Amino acid sequence: MDIVVDSREQRPLWTKDIEIKALNVGDYSLKGHEDKIAVERKSLQDLFGTLGSGHKRFKKELERAEGYDYFAIVVDGSYSDCKKKNFAGSFYSKMKGYVIIKILFTLHVKYKINIFFTNGRVESKQVIKSIFEAYITNISK
C-alpha cells in the first residue's frame, strides 16, 4: 500500500515509505487513487478552527470530495472530548462542543462523509490504514 501525504500536512502520521505531494482533497490518499479516496485528519483544536472560522475553505474541500468514491474525516480525539471541548487550547475557540458535533453529523448525513473519533494520533493512523486496506480489497473485486 503506497500512501500519499498532502504536502501541507504539518505533522504527518507517516514519515517513511510515503509520497508527499499536494492533494486536491484530504491529507492522506493512496498512490494511483488520489482522485478517488481521501481522508482528512483533524486534531480537536484544528477541527474547532476549521468548522468555526475556516468553514468556507473547508466547504470548498468537501465540494471537491463529492465526486470521490470515499472520503472520511478522522478526528484525533474522542467524541466525549469534542463535546466537552476538552483539549489543549480550547479556550481560544468560541465554538461550543455540541455545535461541532452537530455540524459533523450533519456532514455525515447530508454528504455521506464518514466521521471517526479516535484516542489520538496512533489510533488515527491505524484507522486510516484500515480504511485504505478495505478500499484496496474492495476495488480489486
Image: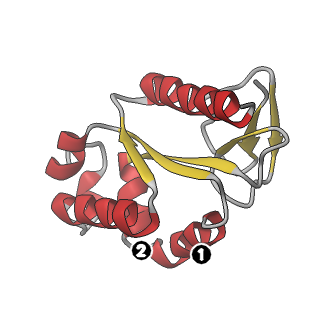
Q: Which mark is residue 53?
A: 2
In the rendered image, residue 2, in percent from the top left (x then y), is placed at 79, 28
Query: Which of the two residues, 40 or 87, is positioned nearer the viewer here?
Result: 40
C-beta proximity under 8 Å, tags 1 and 2: no
Q: Quadrant of residue 43?
A: top left
In the rendered view, tell whether residue 41 sits above or below residue 61.
above
- Residue at left 55%, top 33%? 131
In the rendered image, residue 140, in percent from the top left (x then y), is placed at 75, 31
- Residue at left 45%, top 74%? 55
* First in residue order: circle 1 vs circle 2: 2
Residue corresponding to mark 1: 60
In the rendered view, tell whether residue 19 sits above or below residue 22.
above
The reply, left or right, for residue 76 in relation to residue 93 is: right
Q: Of the residues shown, which amino acid type is indicated by label 2?
A: Ser
Q: Quadrant of residue 24?
A: bottom right
Q: Which mark is residue 75?
A: none
The reply, left or right, for residue 61 in relation to residue 54 is: right
**Element under label 2?**
loop
- In the current view of this chain or complex, which residue is farthest to the front? 141
For the residues labelled 1 and 2, the Cα–Cα distance comes to 14 Å
Q: Quadrant of the N terminus?
A: top right
Q: Quadrant of the C terminus?
A: top right
In the rendered view, tell whether residue 36 sits above or below residue 123.
below
In the rendered image, residue 72, in percent from the top left (x then y), is placed at 51, 49
Q: Of the residues shown, which amino acid type is indicated by label 1?
A: Lys
The reply, left or right, for residue 82 in relation to residue 55 is: left
- Residue at left 72%, top 52%? 36
In the rendered image, residue 133, in percent from the top left (x then y), is placed at 63, 26
**Disc 2 crowd, CA 10 A, few/some/many (<14, 14-19, 20+):** few
